[in-house]
Image (spheres, grey):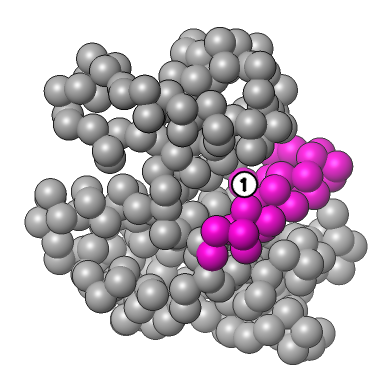
Amino acid sequence: MIAIKHLTHRYDGRDEDAVNDVSLSIAKGERVVILGASGSGKSTLLKCINRLVEPQSGSIEINSEDILKAKKQMSERIRGKIGMIFQNFNLLERETVLANVLNGRLRFNSALRAVFGMFSKQDYHEAEEQLKRVGLEGLSHERVSNLSGGQKQRVAIARALCQKPDVILGDEPVSSLDPKLMKEIMDLITSICIEENITVITCLHFLDFAKKYASRIVGINKGSIVFDGKPGDLTEKDIVEIYGKTRDWYIYGRTGY
């Protein structure tokens, strides 16, 4: 479903590539966790897939369409089928829960209708259904700024589901939550993606979480893939290669979360 070939990106002013000649194929319905220490390039790789970062070279084909070479209209159509869940939620804090979730319906509406918030009955129905699905029924008209961190992430998940995505990308979606909420949110994302056969690619720090929620782990160190396999295949040597014997290795690879 996703074919990444020789992807490379270096940020301005940096001496090393954030993503270094990465090639990766991901099948429909896979639950891939990109695992690595802080600054390893995992978030950059994820953002390249959705063109939030424009890489210097390589290709990213999604359902046989290269999103990096696509013209604006085609690129927007491809991106419309990619839901994104961020560590910092990326919500409109002053808007209501419903207004935020309705933003997931933008790809089904013209630009003019979207600008003026002219959503259809179907859009409203879909938004309410997804709020029920993530356990936020009754909070449609609550301002997002009044919600807890766990509730905000549920809003972000409902927004992504309103897109009817083929792919969901999670950029450290649980890093700002406490351990109990981390488990609740990952359980929710995983169960929905299995039920809907949605391909999910998640960046995580924590080895224990990666093993529990991934069908496949891709380990990255200094922008390069150093492991690609099933969670049960990870050895101590692989874990050190992914993290290096650093503070991140001790915190996320050795002691859990």
**Residue 145 makes an appearance in the image:** no
Tell me if mark 1 has few (under 14), some (14-19) or many (20+) residues whose alpha carbon lies within 10 angstroms of its own.
many
194 drawn magenta: yes
Amino acid type, residue under disc 1 in the picture: Pro
Report x, y in % for residue 96.
Answer: 51, 14
Q: In percent of the image, x 30 and y 71: which residue is there? A: 63
Residue 19, image quadrant: bottom left
Task: Pick the residue in front: 2 or 122.
Answer: 122
Q: In percent of the image, x 44 and y 19: which residue is there? A: 99
What segment carries the magenta color? 173-197
Task: Pick the residue in front: 249 or 101.
Answer: 101
**Which quadrant is the C terminus positioned in?**
bottom right
Task: Pick the residue in front: 42 or 181.
Answer: 181
Report x, y in % for residue 179.
Answer: 84, 45
Which residue is label 1 attached to?
Answer: 173
Q: Is residue 137 above or below residue 40?
A: above
Q: In percent of the image, x 66 and y 17: which residue is there? A: 138
Report x, y in % for residue 78.
Answer: 26, 56
Task: Pick the residue in front: 62 or 8.
Answer: 62
**Which quadrant is the N terminus positioned in?**
bottom left
Q: Is residue 179 above or below residue 68?
A: above
| Dominant SS type (magenta) | helix
Report x, y in % for residue 221.
Answer: 57, 74
Horizontal side of 107 relative to 132 (left or right) equals left
Q: Is residue 187 above or below residue 194?
A: above
